Image: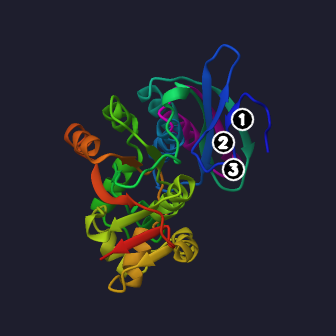
Amino acid sequence: MPTDDSVVLSFDSADDAAAVRLDSGTTLVQTVDFFTPVVDDPYEFGQIAAANALSDIYAMGGKPLFALNIVGFPINDLPKSILTEILQGGADKAAEAGIPIVGGHSIDDKEPKYGLVVTGEVDEENMWTNSGAQPGDILILTKPLGTGIIATAIKKEAAPEESVFAAIETMSTLNKDAVQALQGLEVHAVTDVTGYGLLGHLQEMCQASAVSGRIDFQNLEFLPGVQDLAEAGMIAGGTRRNLAYIKDYTGFDPQLTEVDRLLAADAQTSGGLLISLPQGDAEKFMVSFDSGFQVGKIIERRESSIFISH
């Protein structure tokens, strides 16, 4: 565990990026994320992977500065044009975020993998973490759920076109606009919702903040076709692992079916920001950022970290 006084945040917390204070007083935030394709189109995969990596910086309230590519590619088995498209997708998404990709590293691998190391800066006094949620706060999510289910259906060639289009659109959308809409508001805690799903990331927030969270399942928004795909068994292994883990920390309404619980635990790729803030500020945010929706609230610490009502 790092003991250097310059280390503000590291792996001993469950925050989205590391934070290190420089001698000049500037605080850098840095993250790394990469994964295998979740969609068929290589350019769209590049965009999604880049947006996903950038999200960690946004979740800290940081400003991205530059990025490095991380690439695994079967160079002797697939056309180089596919790699070119992946990298172009990442470069274009980085440009949308206002940053350059200045280098990187690649290896010959059996399966394509792509992502970014992203470096940003943040005002340390106003840096967002996942440890400041307070009882009475409203919980807001900025993107609908269900990308894990749709990605599984894509692999099984069972995803409706509408679902695929919607998933690609949301996964490739930067969380930049949501961050801008939060400026000037009293933000208590933020994390981005990715592989651990809504419940896993909320559990980390509740544990770090010594509070509990209450989720209203009826308020959760899902991408088109997700419920039907879940009923058809299009559930990722990661989602099942999420639910198996979170059951020890969650009180589920008995009316919630196993599919409902899997939907709430769905492993996301490039998901939205989960934000904890006072009710008045939450209302202001949802006026200025109409894609956000209230999923629940923060309550005093109870035996379970999370309670989900039907």
Above or below residue 3? Residue 112 is below
Work out whether mark 1 precedes mark 3 in sequence or the reverse, and give the earlier one.
3
Q: Amino acid at mark 2?
A: Val
Residue closest to the far top: 24
Above or below residue 150? Residue 43 is above
- Res. 261 image quadrant: bottom left
- Residue 71 marker: 2
How far is the residue under mark 1 from the one under mark 3? Answer: 14 Å
Residue 163 % position (x, y): 31, 61
Which residue was labeled with disc 3?
Answer: 74
| Residue sitting nearer the eye, 10 or 206 | 206
- Residue 157 marker: none
Location of the C terminus by quadrant is: bottom left
Tell me the residue at 45%/67% (across/down).
Answer: 266
Q: Amino acid at mark 1?
A: His
Residue 129 % position (x, y): 52, 42
Relative to 180, is 79 on the left or the right? right
Circle 2 packing at 10 Å, graded few (<14), some (14-19), many (20+), is many
Q: Which is in the foreground here, disc 2 or disc 3?
A: 2
Tell me the residue at 45%/45% (across/down).
Answer: 190
Circle 1 packing at 10 Å, graded few (<14), some (14-19), many (20+), is few
Quick check: can you spot residue 157?
A: no
Q: SS at mark 1?
A: strand
Location of the N terminus by quadrant is: top right
Assess whether mark 1 and mark 2 are in contact (beta carbons under 8 angstroms).
yes
| Residue sitting nearer the eye, 241 or 296 | 296
Work out whether mark 2 precedes mark 1 in sequence or the reverse, and give the earlier one.
2
Which segment did they paint magenta? 60-88
Which residue was labeled with disc 1?
Answer: 105
